[in-house]
Amino acid sequence: MKLSILIPVYNERDTLGEILRRVRAVPLPVEREIVVVDDGSDDGSRELLEQLRGPDLRILSHAANCGKGRAIRTGLTAVTGDFVIIQDADLEYDPQDYMLLLQPLLDRRADVVYGSRFLGGPHRVLLFWHYVGNKAFTLLTNILYNINLNDMGTCYKVFRADVLKDMVLRSDRFGFEAEVTAKICKRHHRIYEVPVSYSGRTYEEGKKITWKDGFSYLWCLLRYRFAD
């Protein structure tokens, strides 16, 4: 069995070395591969990746910034694992949670596992309105798709690779989170949630998602409820 760790990167030079160190250090009962997609970084991230290259690391790149969703689609062309986890290149999510996320898949109880920031794991206290936005979009997801998720917008989603590769994904930016959730629900895949730790960033520290991306969430949730 193999876990593919897919890391979209855009201007994350300050945290890139540390997140790769953490990903490589976490003990796993399965083989791992790391696929990094540099999404048009101009801060030296691409050059740093070359210095960090190893036999476990495959590097893909975009000539210009295209967005997280597009970077994930590019990465999916290269992954070879049985499972795929999305790992942001910042330090908001901790790879030490990988086994919690993997276990329902290894036990064949789930097709997809979401790492929830709101189920009691340790988290940095930060940005009330981001919390409200996350809860509002999760509530809308639950209403539209008749499920009971706690954290639709989490980065930590782990998929059986065949589930993810079977989807035609279109979102280029952060709308990926809403689109992939909608399509998982419409295909009636088994979803589990587990608590994960979360150390959020401020905008001064490099956080990229903004209130404008909320429109992408809304559009994707409504669009894919009634069309594919």
Image (cartoon, helix red, strand yellow):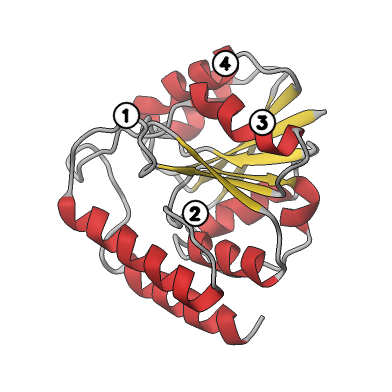
Q: Given the image, on which type of amino acid does mark 4 rest?
A: Val
First in residue order: circle 3 vs circle 2:
2
Q: Given the image, on which type of amino acid does mark 1 rest?
A: Pro
Left or right, 146 with respect to 203, comes to right
Vertical order, 227 against 79 (above or below): below
Name the mark on residue 103: 3
Q: Quadrant of the C terminus?
A: bottom right
Q: Which residue is mark 4?
A: 26
First in residue order: circle 2 vs circle 4:
4
Residue drawn at x 78%, y 36% as measured from the top left: 81
Residue drawn at x 42%, y 70% as measured from the top left: 217
Q: Which residue is mark 1?
A: 122
First in residue order: circle 3 vs circle 4:
4
First in residue order: circle 2 vs circle 1:
2
Q: CA distance from mark 3 to mark 4?
A: 15 Å
Question: What is the x, y in percent for residue 76?
Answer: 70, 49
Q: Which residue is mark 2?
A: 68
Left or right, 74 with respect to 144, comes to right
